[in-house]
Image: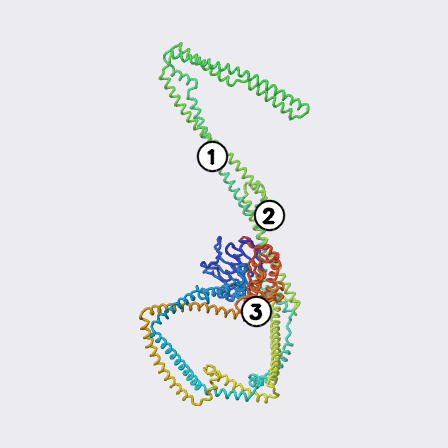
Amino acid sequence: MKILEIYIYGYGQLENVTIKALSDFQVFYGENEAGKTTLMAFIHGILFGFPTKQSSELRYEPKHSTKYGGKLRIYHEEHGYAVIERVKGKAAGDVKVMMDSGAVGGDELLKHLLGNFDKSLFQAVFSFNLQGLQNIHQMKGEEIGKFLFSAGTLGTEQLSKAESFLQKELDVRFKPSGKKPILNEKLQELHELKGQLKKAAAKNNEYEELQRKSETLKLEILRINDTLQKTGERINKIKEWKRIESVVKEEIWTEKELYELGAIDFPARGIERMEKINQLIHPYKAEITSIANRVERLQEELAGINPDLEFLKNEPSILTLLDQVPIMEQLRNEKQQSERKLRDYEEKLSITREKLHLPLSENEILKINTNIYMKNQVEMVTRKKQKLEEVKDELDNQYQEEKRALDEIEKEVRGAEDKILPQKERLLLEEQLNQKSDKKSLEWEIKSIQDKIEFYQQEHERNQAAKNKLKSDRKLQLLLFELILFGVFLYGLFTKQWFLLAVGVLVCIGLVYFLVRGGKQTKEDSIWQTINGLKEKEKILQEKLQSSQYPDITLLENQLILDNQRRQELQLLKLKLKQQQSQFEKIISKFEEWELAAAQNKEKILSISKELNIPGYIANSFLDEAFEYIEQYKSITRDKNQFVLRIKEINQQLSLVEEGLRSFETRFLQEKGLDLHNSAYLLRNKLKEEHEKLIMSKERVLKLEELKADLNQKVQELELLQTEHTKLLQAAKVDSEQQFYNLGEKAKKQEELIERRRHLQNQLQYSILSGEDKEGFLSVHDSAELIKQWDLEIKDLQEKLKKVQDEVAANNFEIQVLEEGGMYTDILHQFKQKNYELAEAAKEWSVYRLAQEVLKETIDKYKNVHLPRMLSKAEEYLYFLTDGSYNRIHLQKSGTGFLVERNDHTVFEANELSQATTEQLYVSIRLALATSLYEKYQFPIIIDDSFVNFDAKRTQKVIELLSRLKHNQILFFTCHNHLLSYFQKENVLCLEKGTVQIT
């Protein structure tokens, strides 16, 4: 059996791993934890079942996958290719075996393929690793021989362990010179009790006398029983003689007759064979004559039949053409219909081109991109354009509404501003309301205003002084800067660098503008306005103070309240105006967004129109209609082209059929120039006629060959019969048939006598009488009288035996009475108890002793029958591995173990060899076991780093030896990189954390 492919669904760290094309010598290399042991366990698991949960072996269930198991593709020498698949299921997994022949089975079919091997036997014979060599290292000298013998029988050290176990159990129970074993202790105790028992018995003479009498009576009983047994045996023998006496005498007579006939050399069933040959020879001669006449007639008939083989050779082509003749009319009708549809399509294309009105050829239109994406783009921009138009209409309406609302609110704001009091009038009104009726308050207010005027005048003077200083500093800075710019201006003018000239002029103008603008009033103007306002207010208060006239307070308050109400209305209107302006600005912003979107969409439309070769003015208004017409045009064109192609195919098909029929008409028909239907009819009839001739010819040829074969067979059989007739005469050593028949009669009589002797011997083989007994009884004339005499002797002995047994019973009763009297009874009880315990322990010892003897007999039988063949192969392997240094392996004369003979005829025990030579001996025995005793089971040999302790030369030798094992596939697992140089590169697979690669 050879493993060709490995498929691992999930097993340990190996998941979804496929290994194909395994070679006859396959090497798996990987570092520790790369998956080598997992792969070996997978092979064992698929072939013999996964380990159960109660087993001490690892189950290698995958951690990251729900699949558990896999399959092997194998080649079996007897049954061919097969696939063995085992997945998670019952305890050992569910197995399925699929043969290439179609047979499918389960465990029973797998056991048949594996020759009923179980996992332990397979591992013991075909799978070994470094552990076997390490076991040799750890053993004592006397144990090495037993271990190697065990490896040569079972493949493991189990036999050696069994021997050691049995010997250990026996030593625990008994040793001839020991004291601690169980049986030794019990024998010592029993010996001591027996001495005590004798001392107690010595105290009673009567008891001893009774014991002696008891012994005498026992001997007498034994003697009588022995006499009875012998007499009974004589009676049985004489009765048996009486039964077989006539048979014995007939056997003696038969032997005498056979002796008189002597030796006859005659063929077995010679007479019957001779008569059968004579009966067959004459019919064979008649049949041969008849068959020869029939052969001659068939040859004449075959000459008259002559089929046209050239015509029949073209039968497939002719039939193909004839089958197409009926459909030619259909093809012509189809051609006419296609031409009509072609004209319709041309008209549709013309109409579509007019609608498109594009200056493009048909090929250019077909090249236009009208895929789904382009169609989607056209639809999107068209919808976008329609939507933008709707949005613009809506924005126009909103703009008009918001513009109208804004104008109305602005009008209301202007009306409200006209109704409120001017700021000066309001200030005057407020001042009038705030005035006091006494002169002091007016004077205080005037003084306060005068103080403010003075403060503002002082502030104005300080500001004026600071401004004059800043102005002078600025003028100095500007003067310097103008000088620099004037220099740039002159440089640009003289060097004609007009850029520098322009820069100088522009900067000068800017500086002049800045000087002019800087000279205007800013903050000072506002201060003078404040001073003037305060002076005007002072003047009013002075006039008021001088006039001493005050307005109506109530009227002033009413005017102020009304102005406050109008101002609040104005604020509300301004707020409303601000909101309306914001809304209006939003509309304006939406217009800007719309214009941007419209521009982008227009640009997209123009881009699409360029791809579709459509003018821009058409694309802006009718893009979707134009795209639809282009699609329609392309669709019609494709349909038109299909009909054009179909018309061309029909024309070619019609032309081929017509030309083919005309060609065969010219070659094979006598009539020429017929129409196609008549020509096809004549060709079909000719085919039928030639086929009938061919069938008749083949039938005649076949019949002729059968008759010739039958004729040759009959002639050969006749010759064989005549040869057999001659051989019979030669075998009987006679010259004529009459002499043959006379000798046959004598041979028949001899056969009958031999058969009768065999029958008589069968009757006598179960008799209890030996040959001497039979010869002795031949001289007995009256056996009945002798039986009667012996019966009387037995009767007398039986009466005598009964009397002695009565005396024994009476004597035992008296002994029992004495034993029940005291201390003697207790000691006797202990003695019997110990005796019983000794018997039980001896029984247990005998079980182990018997097992040891059975094992020894089995080993002896194996040594004498099977082991020599294995040792011969092991000697061959050891001789090769040691370069001829050791050439013979001998068995120990007693026990288990081997003797190894060196090339100088020096003999060594296994423990006397060097460690390396012992390992080579172990490898030789293991390989010899697999290739000799189990040679019909050509299973793969699995080796796991068993040679790492060998030096380079020994490693090379053992690899060469493995390469010579042509009948067994070798699966070699190693983690040592230096060993890879011994193998071909294509035979090495590298395992790397769940993956397999070819190195």
Q: Which residue is drawn at 42% across and 21% down?
A: 420
Q: Residue 279 sits in which quadrant?
A: bottom right
SS under mark 3? helix
The image shows residue 173, relative to residue 438, as above or below, that is below
Residue 81 in sight here: no
Q: Residue at x 37, y 17 (%)?
A: 556
Q: Nearer the viewer, mark 3 or mark 1?
A: 3
Q: Measured from the top left, where is residue 433 in percent x and y?
A: 38, 16
Query: Which residue is identified by label 2?
Result: 367
- Dot 1 alpha-carbon crowd within 10 angstroms: few under 14, some 14 to 19, many 20 or more: few
Quadrant including the N terminus? bottom right
- Residue type at numbered disc 3: Arg
Marks 2,3: beta carbons within 8 A? no
Tell whether 216 sits left or right of 744: left
Q: Residue 864 sits in which quadrant?
A: bottom right
SS under mark 1? helix
Quadrant including the C terminus? bottom right
- Residue type at numbered disc 2: Lys
Q: Please state which of residues 325 and 290 is positioned toward the viewer in this rendering.
A: 290
- Residue type at numbered disc 1: Asn
Query: Which residue is identified by label 1?
Result: 397
Q: Which of marks 3 and 1 is nearer the N terminus?
A: 1
Q: Which of marks 1 and 2 is in front?
A: 2
Q: Nearer the viewer, mark 2 or mark 3?
A: 3
Q: Measured from the top left, where is residue 699 in percent x and y?
A: 60, 75
Query: Which residue is identified by label 3?
Result: 869
| Mark pair 3, 1: CA separation | 117 Å
Residue 313 is marked as none
Q: Which of marks 2 and 3 is nearer the N terminus?
A: 2
